[in-house]
Image (cartoon, rainbow, N blue to C red):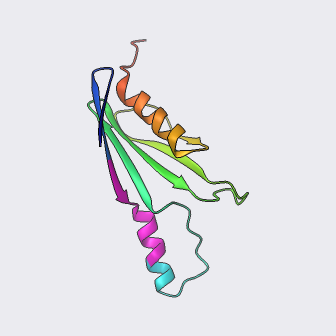
Amino acid sequence: MNERRDNQTVRREKQIHLGYKEWEKAVHGGYTFFRNVVGKYQYIYTSDLGKISLVELPDYFRDGKDLWEIYCLEGDLFEDVERFDSQKEGEKQAKEYLTKRRQSS
């Protein structure tokens, strides 16, 4: 899926998260005490400005609430991680970072 915003094309790629694959292997290997901390899919958003990962964090704080997290893979677009209540909110913020040029300091 490609979306054009502010003269930047944002591309989205959906893939199975490596952490989820490892969790599946552990469960199939009989290790049932491991808790899955990421959702099955990782969404990678890319533009000329960088690359951002969006993942689901199911019941991350064990409060019954799922979160969504973005992390900058390339481009130094923001520091650390940012968490959101919905996939839609996380996707919106990722696209904003990938379509806005940074202001010079």
The answer to whether residue 15 is magenta is yes
> Looking at the image, is 60 positioned above or below residue 6?
below
> Looking at the image, is 51 positioned above or below residue 19?
above
Residue 74 occupies which quadrant of the picture? top left
The residue lying furthest to the top in this view is 105
Image position, residue 54 (x, y; %): 45, 47
Image position, residue 104 (x, y; %): 39, 12
The residue lying furthest to the right in this view is 63
Q: Residue at x 70, y 60 (%)?
A: 62
Report the number of discs: 0
Image position, residue 21 (x, y; %): 41, 70
> Looking at the image, is 36 positioned above or below residue 72?
below
**Quick check: 34 left or right of 74?**
right
Q: Residue at x 54, y 83 (%)?
A: 31
Image position, residue 90 (x, y; %): 51, 40
Task: Please state which of residues 3 and 104 is positioned toward the viewer in this rendering.
Answer: 3
The residue lying furthest to the bottom in this view is 30
Name the quarter where the N terminus is drawn: top left
Name the quarter where the C terminus is drawn: top left
Task: Please state which of residues 2 and 52 is positioned toward the viewer in this rendering.
Answer: 2
The answer to whether residue 43 is magenta is no
Which span of residues is magenta-colored?
13-24
Task: Please state which of residues 50 and 11 is positioned toward the viewer in this rendering.
Answer: 11
